[in-house]
Image (tube, helix red, strand yellow):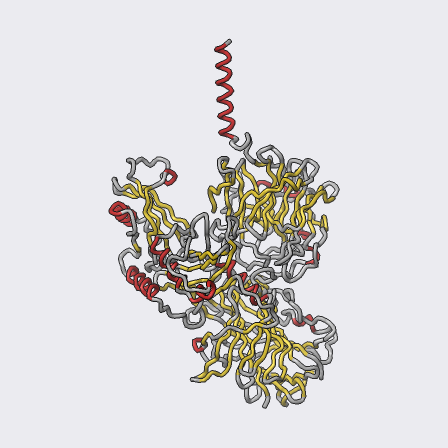
Amino acid sequence: MMKYSLCTMKWWMELLVLWLFIFPNNGFAQREIKPCQQEPAFIRTLGYDPLWTALSTSEKTYIGISLIAFEKKTGQATPTAQTPKMDIYQHPSWKTAGYLSTISFDQLGNAYTVPAPLISMLYNQTEKLNTIYKIDAINGEMNEWVNLPFAAKPSSHNPYGLLGINYDCQDHFLVVSTVAGSDRYNERGVIYMINPRNKKTIDSITNFDAMGLGFALDESRKKRLYYGSTRTGNIFSVVVNTKGKMEKKTIRKELSLEGYGPRGDDKARKIKFSGSQLLVSGTAFNYNLQAASEKPETLYTFIWLAKEKKWGLINYN
Amino acid sequence: MLLSMFQIIASAQQKKAKPKKPAAVYLNEYRAGLMSSPKVDTNWFIVERKKEIEQILKDSLPVKWCKEKGGEQAILAQKIALADPFFTRYLFDLKTKKPLWNEIFGVYPARPGDIKKGITSLPGSLMRVEMYNYANNLTTIGIVDIFKLKLVSADHYPDMQPDIPSSLIQLAERIAINAPEVEKALGFKPNSQKPIMSSTKTALNRTKCERSQHLCVAPTFVQGNRALWAIVDLTDNRLVGLRWTNTGTDAAVVTERKLQNETVADCYCEKVNSINKNGWNMDYLLTASDGLQISNVSFNDKRILNSAKLVDWHVSYSGTDGFGYSDAVGCPIYSQAAVVATDPPKIAEIVEGDSVVGFMLEQKFFSELWPGPCNYSYSQRYFFYNDGRFRITCASIGRGCGNNGTYRPVFRISFAGNEQNFYEYAQEGWKHWTKENWQLQKPSTLYDSSGYQYKISLNNSSNYFIEPGKGQFNDGGKGDNAYLYLTKNHLNKDEGETDLVTIGPCCNTNHEQGPEKFINAVPESTANTDLVLWYVPQMKNDDRPGSKYCWAETYYENGVYKIKAYPCFAGPMFVPQK
């Protein structure tokens, strides 16, 4: 009995040590939510292999969204950044909203995207800067999906409206962020949590300008929305319950990009998790338009430092 | 008249603005001297530093060694690293083989994290050598085995800067301490004991020169609960600017770009400034997307212009149908501008012979990575002469996306007066334009004996001749080839007076540049009324040696790369009729 008991204790202690080694922060590390996004069915209908295509909003001579078909390479499962383009397809509806920014897919293959003027305001209507567009998974047609309100009349001091969009694969909500109506002295941005089934806004965080948005599980296995400020390099998070409500009292600052990278004043454009690593795409953002050249972007990789109880930058490139 | 004749003089007065002590001061642009003579350094420590650089560039390896600490071992580690061709890969320009300015910032015992997998060594045998390349803003880190006398690994890190040695900390402090701007901001001349945290490449206090991509540090002076950051550029050896912050753990990092953006926004985008000089009176303001606007312009108390501004830049490339861009120029933050003002406007004297004949107001605009491909820079210059003439001009300073580009800037010029009339010189003399209209300046265009193409009458006693560019202004301009549009200015509606969004597409090669939208389907009468002139010159770029135009490129000088500009100025002169 005694021997059994000692053996049992040792086994439990080993497990505990292992557990704390893998999940040093209260037992769990913050980590990604398993992706759920599906490829849009229209890609196959058009005769393309979904694995060798990509939807893009940054093709130089194409306004709006375009479908890039890559040349298949033997021995490669998917295209790389160097893979040559074979064909570019654009549905007539894909350029009607002007220049677009981020795209997010749902579990049915529908794509959601938001407008963002690129070099000039010529192709983007100011009154549509707060409109979310949806590309139907089946027929590939893009239509206005939801028109969100403006906090203030758009002005020449802020050419942007919606900036961030992401899909919650755990409870199937769509989150978007807008900075419409904000100016240098007034932060009027809003983060909206939307139910894609009925297009209703479930909850919002007001008076906050955000761009990068991402969902992940925190150390207590609670789902959090991570969001990056467009005014500072700060990234915050908030617990989002299964009904899509953001529990404001749980808002906390996760980290700041300030001083990091080649520029030192990056803002989080995209936030995602890979396992327990937090990946942030940072870029300069000053509420003005950008020139023709590609905007430099840096990918920052952070890991959670359990001892210091903070995120530590392990790499950027 | 040559650009080098300009001499920077006092900054403009400010009016219509609440007096407020600025939190930031931006001193000078790193591109100073781009289109005029650069400033000559007189401080002995900078002169010495430059001499040292010149000397080292003549060596077989253009590297300043680190001799500060580490003794014989550190010297040996540097010798080993510098003997390895991979470590020295970027000491010379890869194409021209010209020496670049490099400096070893530090030699330290290697840390466990420095040692790559598979490297075996005796304890204490590995040293880490950190070298900085000023020209490429690149750090090279080599790990050497001083027992085996070989380099065991090396990596090159673009856009990265190692911790600086104490000699550079001292140089940065000297530059800051001896800057009159620092003395003025602090209210006393600091001594070497005063600056703290001067090696700001630490987690505690970082800074960046994001636009110039130079090595910058910030000696910081603490006064009570405030800290004065003095950003010093150690590539150009100069003070970039100053910024007060509150001390505390959450204090924001001050960088070159923040300093530039805040200074320009605070002092020129949100404040109307004014000039009262040589009989000329006017206000000026940096707009969100219409460049530098002048308004309420008068000469000898006679009002001449309501306003003038630069609405758009249309850039089209002839090799590709419909390929190009419409750029707006304006404020660096919270604006619709894609090419932004990073430096304050400048006022300079116009010198002809040995006389000052007027002054110029200039604003330059840059996109972030200029003069890299697909990046743009523009200049806007207003000239005001003592005899009442004035000229409104602009230039592209390249470099754009190709050598087959045509630039079409869109000026909006609104003259004062409610009974204006407009004339064109024709075979039969001055022909009255009685309706809204547009016209292209062509080789066959007729000019009067003085070279004037148009004339505007503000009222019975005040007329201005309009002389378009034909290559006669000695500013490098090859001629305007301009579209001119005349539209009626309705006082009860916005005829483009407020900040305009982009009014035309990039690539129309005809008169459809945007202003035609202000000409009614049935053109309105333009006799004895308020008028607006729109002027759209056309400049074709060129990258051929000897005829570079609307172009910019980097060149080598003293171990680093500098920028050479070939601006293409265009714009009309307005000459009062005597």
Residue A264 position, x and y percent, is 49, 52
Residue B423 quadrant: bottom right
Residue B325 quadrant: bottom right
Residue B460 position, x and y percent, is 67, 89
Residue B466 quadrant: bottom right
Q: At x 46% / y 56%, what residue is drawn?
A: B222
Residue B538 position, x and y percent, is 56, 72
Report if residue B376 is visible in the image.
Answer: no
Q: At x 54% / y 35%, what residue is drawn?
A: A275
B69 on left or right of A256: left
Image height of A172 relative to B216, above or below:
above
Image mark count: 0
Q: Return the residue nearer the eye: A79 or B342.
A: B342
Residue furthest to the top = A1
Residue B238 position, x and y percent, is 41, 63
Report if residue A176 is visible in the image.
Answer: yes
Q: Return the residue nearer the eye: B489 or A238.
A: A238
Q: Return the residue nearer the eye: A167 or A218.
A: A218
Residue furthest to the front = B224
